[in-house]
Image: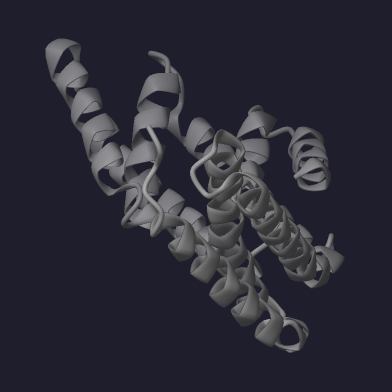
Amino acid sequence: MLVACAVAGTAAYLLGTGRPDWAIMSAILILHSGVDRLVGTYKALHRLVGTVAGLVLFTLVYAAHPHDYVLIVLLALLQFLIELVLVRNYALAVVMITTLVLLVTSVPGQDPAEVMRDRLLDTVIGVAVAVVVLWTVGQSLLRRALPGQLDRVEAVTARLERVVTATGPTSDPALAARRDLQFELIEAVRIADTAYRNAPDDAGVHWQRHLAGQDSGYRLLAACWSQPRRA
C-alpha cells in the first residue's frame, strides 16, 4: 500500500488531475484487504467498470438539475443503496459511490466534464498502479504467510495442552488459551485459502501440515468443551 499510494499519488499530481487523493484512495481500496492477487484483480475490474458506469449515471442526474429537497432525497437514496449492495456487488456500489461523490463535490457553474475527467483518470491511475503492485511487490509474503501461521497454530496448541494439564480446561489461563487457539485456527484457514489461490505449488508443500493442525487443534478444543466450567 505504501508503494502503490506513493506511485499513484505522484503520477496523478504530475498529470495535473486536480484530485490526486482519488488516485491514492483507489489504490488503497484495491490493496487494503491483503495480497490476494486474484481477489484484488477482480476488485480492480469492479472499481473501473463501476466508475465508468457511475460517470454515465452522474451525467444523467446532473442534466436533470436536481435542487433543494430533491437533491437531498437523491443523496440519501444513493447512500442507502450503497450500504445495501456494497458487500454483495462492489461494481454496482461503485456506480452509486461515483455518482454520490461527484454530486457532492461539484459546485455551481463548474464544468462537469472537468470533474468527470479527473475522476476517471485518477481511478485508472490508482487501479492500474494497485494491480501492478499487487502482482509484483511483496510476493514472498505469499510463501511465508502459511508456514508462519502454522507455526503460531502449533505454538498455541502446545500452550493450551500445557495449561490444561496444569490447571484444567476451565481455568482462566485455559480459557484465554482456548480463545487464542480458536482465533489462530480460523486465521489459518483464511491464509491457507489465499495461499492456495495465489501460489498453489507453495501452499501444497504445507497443506498436510495445515490439515493436521486443524484436526489436532479442534480436537483439543472439543475435549476442553466436554469439561463443565467450575463455579
Does residue 41 show up? no
Question: Which percent across, then down, holds residue 126?
Answer: 66, 48
**In the displayed structure image, the side of residue 215 where residue 191 appears, left or right:** right
> Which sits in the foreground, 43 or 107?
43
Q: Identify the residue at image location x=33%, y=57%.
A: 89
**In the displayed structure image, the side of residue 36 where residue 109 appears, left or right:** left
| Residue 71 lies in quadrant | top left
Question: Which percent across, then down, holds residue 17?
Answer: 67, 34
Question: Which percent across, then down, holds residue 168?
Answer: 56, 48
Q: Identify the residue at image location x=35%, y=26%.
A: 103
- What is the quadrant of the N terminus in the image? top right
Does residue 17 show up? yes
> Which sits in the foreground, 120 or 88?
88
Q: Identify the residue at image location x=50%, y=60%.
A: 221
Give above or below for 30 relative to 83. below
Give above or below for 226 relative to 74. below
| Residue 57 lies in quadrant | top left
**In the displayed structure image, the side of residue 149 where residue 42 appears, left or right:** left
- What is the quadrant of the C terminus in the image? top left
Q: Identify the residue at image location x=61%, y=56%.
A: 184
Give above or below for 109 relative to 217. above
Give above or below for 67 relative to 198. above
Question: Which percent across, then down, holds residue 171?
Answer: 54, 38
